[in-house]
Image: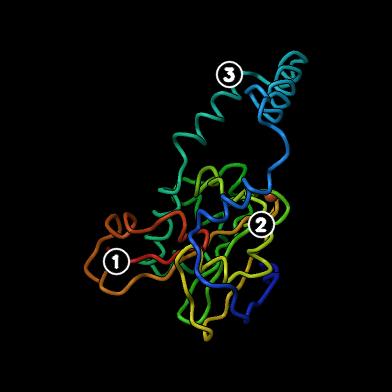
Amino acid sequence: MPAPPVELATSPGPGPFASRDIIATTMAEHDHDHAHQAVPSDLTLRVKALESLLVEKGLVDPAALDALIETYEHKVGPRNGARVVARAWVDPTFKQRLLAEGGSAIRELGYGGAQGENLVVVENTPGVHNLVVCTLCSCYPWSVLGLPPVWYKSAPYRSRAVIDPRGVLREFGLDLPESVEVRVWDSTAELRYLVLPERPGGTENLDEEALAALVTRDAMVGVAKVTAS
Ligand code: FE
């Protein structure tokens, strides 16, 4: 059973903003003096140092690391998740399995791996909208969505998605009526969430592939809806 959502938001937030405001806020908060720091960044250097040490000690194979990075940068992306969503829209028994046991259902379509085992799929309905965040860091369902976008990892998104989910959604251009319950799901390394968006109206004649083409990454994180065009 999935854990209960961390917050059931009912109060309206501030007025509409552009989603880029989240990133702008991050940059504004990051105001200590990096002006004369040479690239690569401190984080990059630390990662390089760790990688060198692990390779030197024979704990990791550099070729395996390269293959892993190549996979998540170029081969795995939100198109995988879009195919999962489209299948759920056209196949009610697959949808049942997906909502009951996300990890094993996505393996039926060939997706899975280390980040996909404990996948919980939460369904949007006319009365419930789900939003995914990782308040601690940036846990994300890599196996179906690839690497997380910058805003997902930003401190403002991570904190505000819980405190003021409706305000955050408005910044992404999604203004939900008060009658819609917003559920926020806090990801962890062990438990990752994927939103099953609502199938838009007017798509009755589309096949699975055409439906998949409509599904966006943002809709599967819960910051957008899927639209028919
Ligand atoms: Fe995390």
**In the rendered image, which residue does mark 3 sit on?**
63
Residue 62 position in % (x across, y down): 62, 18
Counting residues from the start of the chain, the first of labels 2 and 1 encountered is 2
Crowding near the residue tagged with mark 1, few <14, some 14–19, many ≥20 C-alpha atoms within 10 Å: some
Distance Cα–Cα, label 2 vs label 3: 33 Å
Q: Give the quadrant of the C terminus.
A: bottom left
Residue 42 sits in which quadrant? top right
User: Mark 3 is on which residue type?
Assistant: Ala
Q: Residue at x 62, y 23 (%)?
A: 39
User: Mark 2 is on which residue type?
Assistant: Arg
**In the rendered image, which residue does mark 1 sit on?**
228
- CB contact under 8 Å: marks 2 and 1: no
Residue 111 position in % (x across, y down): 49, 46
Residue 159 seen in render:
yes
Which SS class for mark 1? Answer: loop
Residue 149 position in % (x across, y down): 53, 46
